[in-house]
Image (cartoon, rainbow, N blue to C red):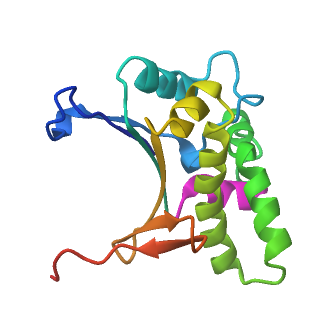
Amino acid sequence: HVVFDWTQPNGKSVRLSRVFVVRSIAAIVPDKDSAGKHDAVIAAIEYGIKHLEVHDIVVMGHSNCGGIHGLLNPDKIRSEEFISRWVSLALPAVQRIDHENPGIDARMRCRLCEEGSVLLSIENLLSYEWVHEPVQAGRLCLHAVYYDLGRARLALWNSETEDFEEVPALHSA
């Protein structure tokens, strides 16, 4: 998911109807060099920034991601041309995970690749001048988020600790 949060010009709180959501397999946002002529994800992001004047972009991945599963098991999606091509955009995240974590078990590798895809998308967003410039000027914030479906837990990327940190539960069931 790529979520845009739009604050009203008068600074009032955002209503749910003011949240602009773009879904993307494996939370992938292609970099400037990889985006095609007709890339809907990039078009939506550009629209959100330039026309809705969003202040926050949240890139959110999740556990049990089918796109990452397909990327890690290419034989399962080999005949699916568009899906294979799309998820291959996250291959740099997989290569980075494999290089930094040799010999990790398959479950942890999958989790790290799901998180890595989110971080790669944040990095890729910054390859666009119309994202990079407002981020540098403090008019736009990029947020990396990971949701563990099985545990119903949300984690936010902390750039100081270089890790996803769980958000404390607001209430207990």
Task: Give the residue displayed 46% in from the left and 74% down from the top.
Answer: 165
- Comparing 125 with 44, the one in front is 125
The stretch drawn in magenta includes residue 55: no
* Residue at 35% across, 73% down: 167
The residue positioned 77% from the left and 28% from the top of the image is 33
Q: Nearer the viewer, residue 12 or 136?
A: 136
Q: Is residue 171 left or right of residue 129?
A: left
Count of numbered circles on the image: 0
- Seen from the viewer's position, the closer of residues 143 and 132 is 132
Q: Position of residue 132 (x, y in %)?
A: 60, 34
Residue 63 in view here: no
Name the side, left or right, on which 153 lies relative to 112.
left
Taking the spot 70% from the left edge, 27% from the top edge, the residue there is 35
Residue 120 in the image, given as x and y percentages of width and height:
66, 51
Quarter of the figure that contains the N terminus: top left
Q: Position of residue 123 (x, y in %)?
A: 66, 46
